[in-house]
Amino acid sequence: MNQKKQHYLLNKAKEAGNLLKNHVEKDHVVRIISHNDSDGLSSAGIICNAVSKLNGKFHVTIVPRLREGFIKKLAREKYQLFFFCDMGSAALESLSRLKKEIIVADHHQIPDEGYDDLENITHVNPHLYEIDGTKDISASGVSYLTVKGMDNKDLAGLALAGAFGDMQGVNGFTGFNKIILDEGIQSGTVEIHDDLKIPYKNEEPIYKSLAYTLNPILPGLTGDLEGSMTFLEKMGVSYGIKFSDLSNEERDILKEELIKVNTNIFGTVYSMPREINPLKNIEDYARILDACGKNKKYGLGLSICLGDKKDSVAEAQRLVKKYQDNLVKGIDWIKKEGSVKLDYIQHIYTEDKRKKSLMGTLASVGLELKYLDPKKPVIAISKMDNVIKISARSTPQQIEKGVNLGKALEEASKSFNGSGGGHNIAAGAVVPYKEMENFLNLVNDIISEQIKS
Ligand SMILES: [Mn+2]
């Protein structure tokens, strides 16, 4: 049963891969459009690597959302093949108007209405085969499946980085992600070992690494530089040195104490032995791409994926530092300010430029650290000129009760001339600023319906 579904997805991916190859062989420049997060950047990176390997050319654009206006602009371009990664499944009708051949490699929910087989679109999406696109495969995984048959199994690690970016590896990889992991291990490009799952072990002093640890969350340490210093001082470990410079004995003490804070801190660490630090650690790789995306340095993110390691990584790390600094401040803000509560949802709001790109993360971390009410989905709002950008986050417990944020935001945003959608656990939307109150009330009503039905 399960294997059959997997087989269908693999076949579809292969079909897309063959189409890609045919176009490259005809010397067509592949027009790649992808999303601006680490999954989107990894996806684009995977396709670019595959096209390069075939000695083909590509033209990439990274966007935060697939807007109608942008699709219209694409319709005027002369390319023969458009390849959409990490987006497109919700816009098939519009995309089909591009009239050229189109591949959509996405893992977002597919709207109930509006999916027909459109002749010029090869649509690769796990949801078509009842495979879970929120935890079993990300867009970078779908992209990897598309090109892996062309001698690209070395890209498995990059596919996993994208999965981490979409929070899929947090409790171990399952489904297709596990298959991709096994292929990476087999090809010798991915390794696993048990260790402390803290970021930037070779780059940052330990107290900072601890404060920057989000997966898993470390109560009292995550987002808290002082808390982390005190924690290390108490056990007699110098907080100012890097984890990689600790003695074995110190590492053991630290491990023991951290496990008391959160047992999940010790577990499988995924690495790519052929990469340089910090890309070697696949989760750090994902964090670096994320920082590139959030700072709109898409070219930088892609060049890292494409093999320009040293200079690009150094530049990306400066972005990471800035990002981590803002993150720590943001968590402190959530801790102090909390959220505004409605009956079924809660919201946080900012006009601060430094917080805007962090709101989704702050919502997740706030829920996990219980600075926000873990029983209610968080609607995180950033004001951009005359619209508000929304990142919504829920928890597995809320989903079990029926919460589906992707559907709620899609429906509510449409009612106010906005757009939105995503996954049950995480979703996004954009709506006019003047409709903010109405929008929140409608989301509140929709969530209440979801829970009751
Ligand atoms: Mn994604």
Image: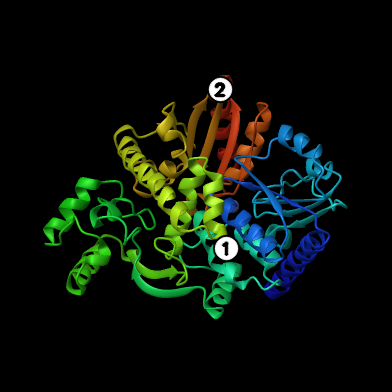
**Dividing the picture into quarters, in which one does residue 250 lie?**
bottom left
In the picture, the quarter occupied by the N terminus is bottom right
Q: How is the image coloured?
A: rainbow
Q: On the picture, is 71 further left or further right than 240?
A: right
- Left or right: 69, with 373 as reference point: right
Q: Is residue 121 left or right of residue 126?
A: right
Residue at point 41% right, 42% down? 362
Task: Give the residue furthest to the bottom.
Answer: 186
At label 1, counting other C-alpha atoms closer than 10 Å, the crowd grade (few under 14, some 14-19, many 20 or more) is: many
Whether residue 282 is situated above or below residue 35 in the rendered picture: below
- Amino acid type at circle 1 is Ala
Q: Which badge, 1 or 2, is on the more N-terminal residue?
A: 1
Give coordinates of residue 407: x percent, y percent.
Answer: 64, 43
| Residue 52, horizontal then vertical, whole percent | 67, 61
Question: Tag 2: residue type?
Answer: Tyr
Residue 117 position within the rendered picture, expressed as x and y whole percent measured from the top left: 85, 53
Total label count? 2
Q: Which residue is mark 2?
A: 433
Spatial CA span between label 1 and label 2? 36 Å
Q: Is residue 287 visible?
A: no
Q: Decide: few, some or many residues near mark 2? Use Cα within 10 Å; few <14, some 14-19, many ≥20.
A: some
* Residue 149 appears in the rendering: yes
Asked if residue 83 is positioned above or below residue 447 in the image, the reply reads: below
210 and 349: which is toward the camera: 210
Local secondary structure at mark 2: helix
Q: Is mark 2 within 8 Å of ligand 1?
A: no
Q: Position of residue 425 (x, y in %)?
A: 54, 49
Q: Which mark is residue 159?
A: 1
Mark linked to residue 6: none
